[in-house]
Image (cartoon, rainbow, N blue to C red):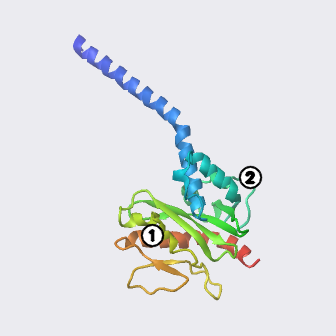
Amino acid sequence: MNKNNLYIFIYASVLVILVAAILSVTATVLKPYQDKNKEIARKLNILHSVDKGWDSNQATSKNDYVEQQYEKYITGSLVVNSKGDSVKGMDAFAIDLEKEYAKPPEERALPVFFCAQNDGSKNIILPLRGKGLWGPIWGYISLQDDFNTIAGAVFDHSDETPGLGAEISTRPFQLQFIGKKLFDDEGHFVSVSVNKSNEPKTEFHSVDAISGGTITSKGLQKMIADCMTLYLPYIESNKNR
């Protein structure tokens, strides 16, 4: 190797090491901020499912506003297993649903959150995770204290098509779920269907699908049914109390 080539090799190696070091330091410095942003986004989604937190973008400090609203309205949480029994020593907020859903059903830990409204009513908040057209979709459904009637819903995504499947994250679509029920009049679990215009609808168990977003709509329908099924032992043991 001649001197010119050696110089180029050394220069390139030093440059690569320097850039890698800078990126590593930057990632380390930024990680606490990124983790905090994820925490605030999750708390805001939980709040939105119970119709709270909508003024966060107008607050002087969004993070402080969300933290205050969360502390005020989200009064507790617990973790349940596949039998609906409470699991001690686990933090519901720290649970990663993606990791839990990769486990066999009998090994999953399922978070539950509780909300106390200003009028004294209470909501039970259950997280969701599923698959849309292009990637994961997720959200939260809140129930009235009958453990049947939906009080609110919020959904989000990472890769759905703008103007089509991405509409699951819009307020008009989500508002359709309020007042829908998980169980029919005989007490059978039927969930909520997301129906196209040519599909039959029922008053308490269906909403309108997104025009042009059929696959995402049906993915969301499956997500609700699958996730609520996991919670059925817990719901069934509480809804008639």
Residue type highlighted by circle 1: Gly
> In which image quadrant can residue 131 be found?
bottom left
- Above or below, 141 against 186 in this view is above
Question: How far apart are the alpha carbons under marks 1 and 2?
Answer: 33 Å
Name the residue that disc number 2 marks.
89
> In which image quadrant can residue 97 be found?
bottom right
- Above or below, 17 against 135 in this view is above
Residue type highlighted by circle 2: Gly
Instruction: Please tell me whether mark 2 sits on a helix, a strand or a loop.
Output: loop
Q: Position of residue 61 (x, y in %)?
A: 57, 45
Name the residue that disc number 1 marks.
219
Q: Position of residue 162 (x, y in %)?
A: 36, 61
Instruction: Please tell me whether mark 1 sits on a helix, a strand or a loop.
Output: helix
Which residue is at 68% across, 59% downward? 73
Q: Residue 236 — which label? A: none
* 1 or 2: tag closer to the N-terminus: 2
- Above or below, 92 against 82 in this view is above
Q: Quadrant of the C terminus?
A: bottom right
Of 4 and 213, nearer the camera is: 213
